[in-house]
Amino acid sequence: MRPSKRGRALAARLRQVFIISVVCLALYCFLLVPDHSLDSSRTKLPPALLNNRFLTSSQCAAAFPGLTKEIDDVVAKGPFTLPRRPHDLGPLVARIRDGKLYILSYARKSDLSKEMLQHRSATLHQIAAALLTTPPSEPLPNTIIAFNHEDEPTSPSLSYSRPADPSFNGPSKHYFPIPHFSFYSWAIPTVHSFPRASAAITTLETHLSWSSKSPLAIWRGTTWFNNPRAARLRQDLVHLTRDKPWADVQPLHANNSNALSIEHFCRHRYIIHTEGVTYSGRFQYHQLCSSVILTPPIAWMQHLTHLVKPAFSSSLEGVTRTPLGTTSRADQLAPYPAPWVKAAWPRSYDPGKEANMVFVAPDWSDLEATVGWLERHPRVAEGIARRQRELFDGGGYFSPAAETCYWRAAIRGWSSVVRTEGQGFEDLEEIPWEEFSLKEIHK
């Protein structure tokens, strides 16, 4: 018996419904179901919260989990004595009393460069802002602080970084990493200030997809600015990448004619990062990009470097190291990761689900292979990049609110373990910050 005309029409309609349903399901799975390689566990926080400098301690902890790990770790080492130096060189010493800042001991302007004076002044402005916006219900304790405005961290002090190598950060060392001075301002034409750069990066990232970014791994810098432990890190990078089709690596010209605005780096899928004599001030700017940072293992921990989740290049299947010199052999390559790296960074995170950065060999022997691997795994690469931006920008860890939360936690943590009795600080003249700030701006 042949099916009726009405039955054939019904069957055809059912087939159409089935096909449409399958297509819709496929589109849903592809576009809406989270892809773990791109997923972030953080929800973007509202601007009203990220710009609120008046948060209480409990509000800070709820908004920014893990923010104060560096402080918690150094406080856990217990009390220490802050000695009074026989001269004014070294860390600036200041008193906090009843929410006010007073300068006790400081290097003379004639002993500092113009740039160093700017850095010192910017950080003192940050401290003053943290004091000014302290919630009345949680007054900060009275204390004496030592703030080190040099690149090289000193113990005990509030410093811009600390050594990542545990052998240089033992129980007797008391480094309190603090936010970089550029969160207030950085008077160089490629940056200006963190808020300006952050806004420019947001504008760029909003209109730039991963596929439209340049595949060239980018770097700019001075070749002589190396830590002695890093040997010829920057020179080797320039040598290795010369004429390579996958790289845009250039040493800065003497007149800075090839310098780039800090936001320009976000136009590239891969940003090569190098530390300087110690930490690199550009690091946190690159972390705002939805780009993959390729760097040797970080040797200097800034106040939020502990949030980095690295995937080691050595864990990427098929990535191998190639000796740089024509006479070198693979068995002559230095071990990677080095023992200190394993101690400082004991875990390599899953690049498809967790990692937000990639660590490469410090001699750059696997840099080309790593870039190639990421290009062959674009969704994994995009996921690493996206997790980075969603954490530091969307999660607000570089926001004004988080910065101020951190400063107040640092002051509280410092005051709980510092001992200043009998060191002679009570004999020093106090200069109110407001008066000192006016003297600071004139060289």
Image: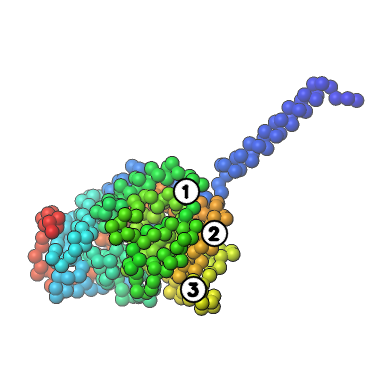
Snapshot quadrant of residue 142: bottom left
Residue type at tag 2: Gly
Placement of 27 over or under 138, stated as above or below: above
| Whole-percent x, y for residue 194 in the image | 31, 51
- Residue ID for mark 1: 213
Residue type at tag 1: Lys
Out of 239 and 173, give the one closest to the viewer.
239
Nearer mark to the viewer, of 3 and 2: 3
> SS class of the residue under badge 2?
helix
Snapshot quadrant of residue 375: bottom right
Badge 2 density bin: few <14, some 14–19, many ≥20, Cα 10 Å: few
Mark 2 to mark 1 CA distance (whole Å): 16 Å
Placement of 403 over or under 48, stated as above or below: below
| Whole-percent x, y for residue 309 in the image | 46, 60
- Residue at 27% over, 72% down: 155
- Residue ID for mark 3: 325
Out of 239 and 295, give the one closest to the viewer.
239
- Residue ID for mark 2: 372
